[in-house]
């Protein structure tokens, strides 16, 4: 049996970062979470882990050692043309929500993924 866990994240603006990641992942604010220096989001279906954001005074200074990858179609196999279309659509929506597009990666001749930054500069990928 899997263990329930929470991903903890440092943030300068926990509410803003929680709102961005809730939009990115389809999560919702955690009921009854009331820490004035934090925010928490949860999977509305209760399947994925909670993600907590705690206010810290320092800004991000180096590359993430761990990051979230957003998979638009879940696990393979998928239609590569449809996958690329959905990735590009999701990237555009995330830019509208406050993310920054950094670069596109390819696997040989095939479309791979898009590297992005969340509103506080944390790297993540959309694949």
Image (cartoon, rainbow, N blue to C red):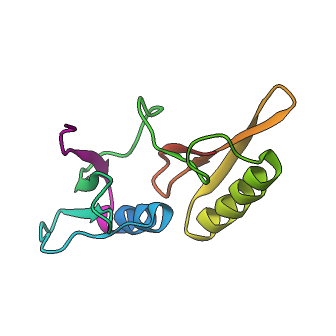
Q: Position of residue 30 (x, y in %)?
A: 22, 69
Q: Quadrant of the C terminus?
A: top right
Numbered range of the magenta stretch: 1-15
Residue most extreme to the bottom: 31
Which residue occupies the foreground of this view, 76 or 118?
76
Horizontal arrangement in the rendering, residue 124 relative to residue 53 (left or right): right
Question: 37 above or below 74?
Answer: below
Q: Residue at x 61, y 52 (%)?
A: 73
Q: Is residue 16 magenta?
A: no
Residue most extreme to the right: 109
Q: Is residue 13 magenta?
A: yes
Q: Position of residue 111 (x, y in %)?
A: 79, 39
Q: Residue at x 45, y 60 (%)?
A: 25
Q: Quadrant of the N terminus?
A: top left
Residue 67 placement: quadrant: top left
Horizontal arrangement in the rendering, residue 118 relative to residue 34 (left or right): right
Horizontal arrangement in the rendering, residue 101 relative to residue 51 (left or right): right
Residue most extreme to the top: 108
Q: Position of residue 91 (x, y in %)?
A: 66, 58
Which residue occupies the foreground of this view, 4 or 6?
4
Q: How many numbered circles does the render carry? A: 0
Q: Position of residue 27 (x, y in %)?
A: 38, 66
Which residue occupies the foreground of this view, 56 or 107?
107
Question: 124 above or below 95?
Answer: above
Q: Residue at x 71, y 63 (%)?
A: 89
Which residue occupies the foreground of this view, 42 or 19?
42
């Amino acid at each position: 049996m899997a263990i329930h866990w929470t991903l903890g994240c440092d943030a300068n603006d926990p509410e803003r970062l929680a709102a961005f990641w809730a939009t990115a992942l389809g999560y919702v604010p955690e009921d009854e979470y009331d820490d004035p220096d934090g925010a928490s989001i949860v999977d509305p279906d209760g399947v994925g882990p909670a993600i907590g954001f705690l206010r810290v005074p320092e800004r991000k200074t180096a590359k993430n050692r761990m990051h979230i990858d957003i998979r638009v179609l879940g696990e393979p196999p998928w239609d590569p043309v449809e996958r690329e279309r959905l990735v590009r659509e999701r990237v555009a929506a995330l830019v509208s929500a406050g993310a920054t597009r950094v670069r596109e990666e390819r696997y040989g001749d095939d479309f791979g993924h898009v590297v992005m930054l969340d509103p506080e500069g944390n790297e993540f990928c959309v694949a």
